[in-house]
Image (tube, helix red, strand yellow):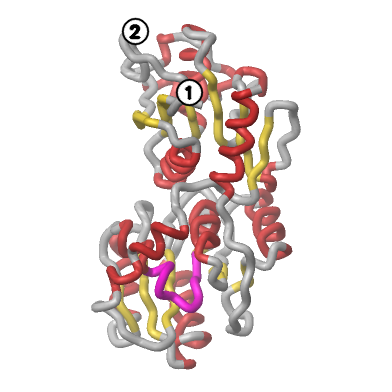
Amino acid sequence: MLKPKALLLTEGYHGMISQVEGLAKALNADFQHRIVRLNWLWNYIPPKLSPVSRLILKNEQYITENEKFDLVISCGRKSVIPSIFIKKKNKKIFTIHIQNPKVRFNNFDLIVAPEHDELKGENIITSKGAIHYITRLEIEKARSYLLDKIQNEKIVSLILGGPNKYYNFSNEELTNIFGEIKSSFISQGYKAIIIPSMRTPKRIIDLAINEFLTDGFVVNSVDKQAYLSSLAIANSIVVTCDSTSMISEAATSGKPIFVAHMQPKRNNYRFKRFYKLFRELGVIKNLGEKVENWTYNSFNEAERIAAIIISRLKS
């Protein structure tokens, strides 16, 4: 199969970018990534109620007559209609949507959805957790990046998310998480590396700096190499509960993962199904449970799913 050319459509959030780029890389595709922008009214209307029309698009730069793409890989609610619109213009383009599009599934050639979403259909491929762009090789290549920042026999990495529609990330909740890390890890001779994400506000970074002034190192801005290095050098990893993508990425390391839970502000049944699955797979425990080492087969769902897609494209 020749190297395909792919157009990636997302809303620009880290979790979405990680998924579309992870799949594109696993498919060995040349790709261009474009951020979807809709006209203001259509940002608030679900895809199932939106017309498949250029009227909802803030710009039409997603695809031009001079560009020839073999694939469109989309992720996120706002990318659903643009992907369908592109398919409507060119039936030869193979469209893949990641996550539940919440429109008729036959609008896409394939849908890739996490197992915990419980979607069923002939064109649906399920993944264990979220697919992403991180590989074991990338993690190992970044190992030395943080070694001059923290030198200790035992290291715990804390991967921080940020406020979303499910979790507030109040200072009280963060103080409790930091306190549990000190109780479970720092008291046992660990040093901590604190890694923020794109959604981590400055107040949380500042709080972490104050809490771990003498007990670790806080990366004070988004830094992919620091993130990968922290996964490589950590003995254990703690991830906040707000992101299935971050937990799935951490599982690439094969290291023990502890989930730092917070009180949800709305029903988080999808998260609960995800936690249940990953606990049954031996990947996660809850922060506060006994600190111990365990192993599991590290995940590379993007490559597994890419192999399925390639076989379907050949058939």
Residue 309 pos. (x, y %): 60, 32
Numbered circle sitting on residue 272: none
Residue 313 pos. (x, y %): 60, 24
What's the amino acid at mark 2?
A: Glu
> In this orientation, which residue lies closer to the viewer: 176 or 88?
88
Does the stretch in magenta take in 236? yes
Q: Where 108 falls versus 277 (above or below)?
A: above
Res 167 visible = no
Does the stretch in magenta take in 115? no
Which residue lies at the image location 47% right of the left edge and 50% below the top edge?
164
Mark 1, residues whose alpha carbon is within 10 Å: few (<14), some, or many (≥20)?
A: many
Give the residue pinned by disc 2: 65
Q: Of the residues under marks 1 and 2, which one precedes in the sequence?
A: 2
Name the quadrant of the C terminus: top right
Which residue lies at the image location 66% right of the left edge and 54% below the top edge?
274
Which residue lies at the image location 62% right of the left edge and 68% below the top edge?
284
> In this orientation, which residue lies closer to the viewer: 279 or 232?
232
User: Residue 292: which quarter of the image?
Assistant: bottom right
Numbered circle sitting on residue 71: 1
Q: Where 173 falls versus 129 (above or below)?
A: below
What's the amino acid at mark 1?
A: Leu
Badges 1 and 2: C-beta atoms under 8 Å apart?
no
Mark 2, residues whose alpha carbon is within 10 Å: few (<14), some, or many (≥20)?
A: few
